[in-house]
Amino acid sequence: MKASLIIKNIDNLITLRGENKPRIKEALKDIGIIKNGILALNGENIIYVGEGELPSDIIIDENTVVLDGTGKTVTPGLVDSHTHLVHGGSRENELAMKLRGVSYLDILAAGGGIHSTVKSTKEATFEELYNQAKKSLDRMISFGITTIEAKSGYGIDDFYTEKKQLEVAKTLNEDHPIDIVSTFMGAHAIPKMYKENPEVFVDIIINEMIPEVAKNKLAKFCDVFCEEGVFTVEQSRRILLAAREYGMEAKLHADEIKPLGGAELAAEIGCITADHLIAASDNGIKKMAEKGVIANLLPGTSFNLQTGEFAKARKMVEEGVPVALSTDYNPGSCPTENLQLIMSFASLIMKLTPEEVITAVTINGAASIGLENEIGSLEAGKQGDIVIFDSPNLEYILYHFGINHTDTVIKKGEIVYKKTC
């Protein structure tokens, strides 16, 4: 077979080889390192991963692209499996208020917070949302991200805006090298007009929004913000079970602030992920482990909000919960596209090992969006999504935090990013 691209002399080739399923406990640390590694692709797919030289049956000719991995670390393309990619505006104007100690509720009452983003997103045209999201995708790919999940949720009671967000994500998925998997999150907040009777809004989501999203194939997943003052456990259950009837898999913003029972609900109904989990109970963590629900942890949000509270990542690993890590990129609580920084936070603050961290943003991240059979590890037959890091080893990427270590990004066998200086 002819190789269209090879990477040779790789100091540290991190393959994540193994079963195509979320890794737990000790398996989180088994990252399949090959020293003096070599990797070959034919078109979009990987055809060989090994040590030393290519086998004789793989042909190289003058058209083969050859990259040198000397002094480099090579990993699968990174997966950012929780983002709010498509939105209007930004909220840097709230920074000064936060520094003065103004509470989030007071910012909200003044028209800020999520209300500000909802207003900006409603007012933005399709083209404006597209261009802003594309700029974020360009940043993401420069950090080694090759696949993301993108949620709606800034239309809330305005279903036209919810669909507009999903349609922007769908178009960008067709136009941009990064693969985008969409999630419908109309249940992101209770609109003011339904505060006295939220069940009316829940019925609208179930009977009007979900069928329309499914009919137009705009989302693979449905997500709900299950939290005190937002959607109750029972309301979240109703919405997610209704979405499942229409073919959408369930995700859940769970126990971010209060131990409401979101982790337990995620286990009960078999969500693919429960996200945030800062206040998850020990019982909820145990039940997630029993049911194989992936904990999608977002340390950048805790860092930015300066609450001092982070998800109990080490306990989750010890209990056997599969763990993924994501940016939670959004204009309010975590305005960063830098997944490498999140990886450092997970290690330095949450005490995950470098091996656990890279597993969380590759094969476990892929499993978080149902793509573990296609991406997330470097093995023959899988899609050629690869990052070459200008780093002598994995530990250095996390240790030397706050900078971009990416040298080259390959998506479906094509070089889509190359460091220029």
Image: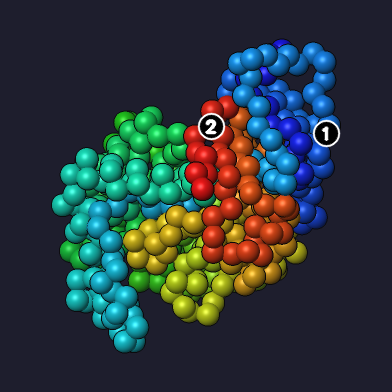
For the residue pair 187 and 201, the one nearer the viewer reads as 187
Picture quadrant where residue 314 is located: bottom right
Disc 2 residue crowd, few under 14, some 14–19, many 20+, Cα 10 Å: some
Say which quadrant the N terminus sits in.
top right
* Left or right of 308 on screen, residue 161: left
How crowded pointer 1 is (Cα within 10 Å; few <14, some 14-19, many 20+) is rated as some
Question: On the image, numbered disc 2 is attached to which residue?
Answer: 415
356 over 381 or under it: above or below: below
In screen coordinates, is 247 left or right of 269?
Answer: left
Counting from the top left corner in percent of width and height, residue 200 is at 25, 57
Residue 268 picture location, percent across and down: 57, 54
Q: Residue at x 35, y 71 (%)?
A: 229
Q: Report which quarter residue 105 is drawn in.
A: bottom left
Residue 149 appears in the picture as rendered:
yes
Q: Amino acid at mark 1?
A: Glu
Q: Residue at x 63, y 64 (%)?
A: 400
**Residue position for label 1:** 51
Q: Is residue 256 above or below residue 174?
A: below
Task: Say what amino acid the circle numbered 2 marks.
Answer: Ile
Q: Real-space Cα distance between discs 2 and 1?
A: 22 Å
Residue 244 place in picture, x, y as percent: 45, 41
Percent coordinates x, y for residue 376 in the rendering: 63, 40
